[in-house]
Amino acid sequence: MTRADILVQFDLHGILPTPQRLEIAEILLAKPQHLSAELIIERLRQAGSSVSKATVYNTLNLFGDRGLVKVLSLDPERRYYDSSTVPHHHFYNIDTGEFTDIDEDQVRFNALPRLPEGTQSESVEVLIKVRRQRD
Ligand SMILES: [Zn+2]
């Protein structure tokens, strides 16, 4: 995604552009991928950026809240930011910590539970946890 594309996305999602936000978005939105805050910080450092950790965390929260990226939360300690916001499912490899996308049409449901009273369905996402095969 070019800087111009990112500015359009910021505008669509009501995000004010700052140099730090642009730097972070350029890394995360470069391609379909799933990155943790730590990985993004590592890449920023490699690129010679001095954006603070706190700014990275705040920016990622903002991107998630505004729907610019999708937040994949395994637990409060382990969050990944998904640059693809179209509905899809995931494989999660517990050996490597990597997510792989599964197209939405590759998963079918023939039964879903009744929703709790007073709620409506927002999305249904499948996370298939995999590990290296053991002989
Ligand atoms: Zn994904």
Image: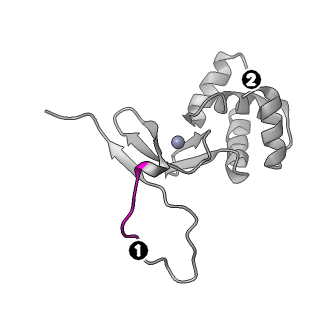
- Image vertical order of residue 41 relative to residue 78, above or below: above
Is residue 4 something one can see in this rendering?
A: yes
- Image vertical order of residue 48 relative to residue 92, above or below: above
Q: Element under label 2?
A: loop
Residue 93 x %, y %: 37, 38
> Where, quadrant-wise, is the C terminus in this rendering?
top left
Q: Quadrant of residue 9?
A: top right
Check disc 1: other Cα within 10 Å, few if <14, some if 14-19, many if 20+: few
- Residue at 64% in and 16% down: 46
The residue indicated by pointer 2 is 50
Instruction: Indicate yes or no whether the magenta region holds residue 109.
Output: yes
Foreground pick, 55 / 91? 91
Region of the chain picked out in magenta, as a range: 106-112
Q: How many numbered discs, if any? A: 2
The amino acid marked with disc number 1 is Pro
Residue 113's label in the rendered image is: 1
Farthest front residue in view: 105
The amino acid marked with disc number 2 is Ser
